[in-house]
Image: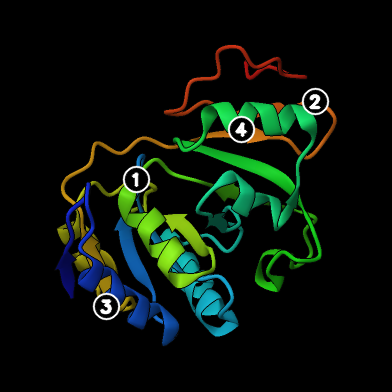
Amino acid sequence: MILEVNAEHPQPRKVDRIIQVLKKGGIIAYPTDSVYAIGCDVLNMKAVERLERLVSEIKQAPDHAPLSIICSSLSNISEYSLISDYAYRTMRRLLPGPYTFVLEATKKAPRSMRKQRKTMGIRVPNAAIPLSIVEALGSPLATTSATLADGELIPDPWTIEDTYGHAIDLVIDGGYLFPEPTTVIDFSEDLPRLIRQGKGEVEGIEFFEPLL
């Protein structure tokens, strides 16, 4: 089912409807500042496991990239991860924005994100819909990009409905996107590493090992 939501000013009653779906263990598709994403309540283990099975099925890769989480703010990120002074200053300048930061998880991080891993990817997108959802839900979203089987990013809710409709509970229509992956920066060690150059600019960041 597709639910149209105002991308700039999400209607509270529609956000409430989305929260009801998530609290019941549902999976949703939603627009961010970079791509359409698919996610669920990170604190609901059954929902996260269901999301992981879906990702493996659609992306046809059991070793796909781990799920990331969507947080509402930098202070929200600090609840679940260790952030160095340099990382904090850099992230404060860049967020919200089209970045995924790899950070060392703390014991407060959701168990679903710490399975056999010490790090996790965290986002604070510059997009009203996911931020409204996370704030209303009171917990982060476990998330992954919405792609076709060949890895192509999906730009619109209708293609998502055709591709994932059998396995997700709600598709949020925030309009057509020109999808571009996030920039991924690893801050889990002393100096940052650029894992992927994407939509987010990295000017002014000194990397230990620049991306070639």
What is the quadrant of residue 54 in the picture? bottom left
Crowdedness near tag 3: few (<14), some (14–19) or many (≥20) residues, C-alpha within 10 Å: few
Q: Does residue 156 sit above or below 199 in this rendering?
A: below
User: In what element is the residue under mark 3?
Assistant: helix
User: In what element is the residue under mark 2?
Assistant: loop
- Of the image marks 4 and 1, the number of the one nearer the N terminus: 4
Q: Answer with left or right where residue 25 lies relative to residue 210.
A: left
User: In what element is the residue under mark 1?
Assistant: loop
Check disc 2 and give the amino acid type: Leu
Task: Provide residue 193's location: percent of width, then percent of height.
Answer: 71, 27
Check disc 1 and give the amino acid type: Ala
What is the quadrant of residue 114 in the picture? bottom right
Q: Which mark is residue 91?
A: 4
Residue for badge 3: 17
Of residues 127 and 66, the one drawn nearer to the viewer in this rendering: 127
> Between marks 4 and 2, how big is the CA–CA gap?
14 Å
Check disc 3 and give the amino acid type: Arg
Q: Does residue 42 sit above or below 101 in this rendering?
A: below
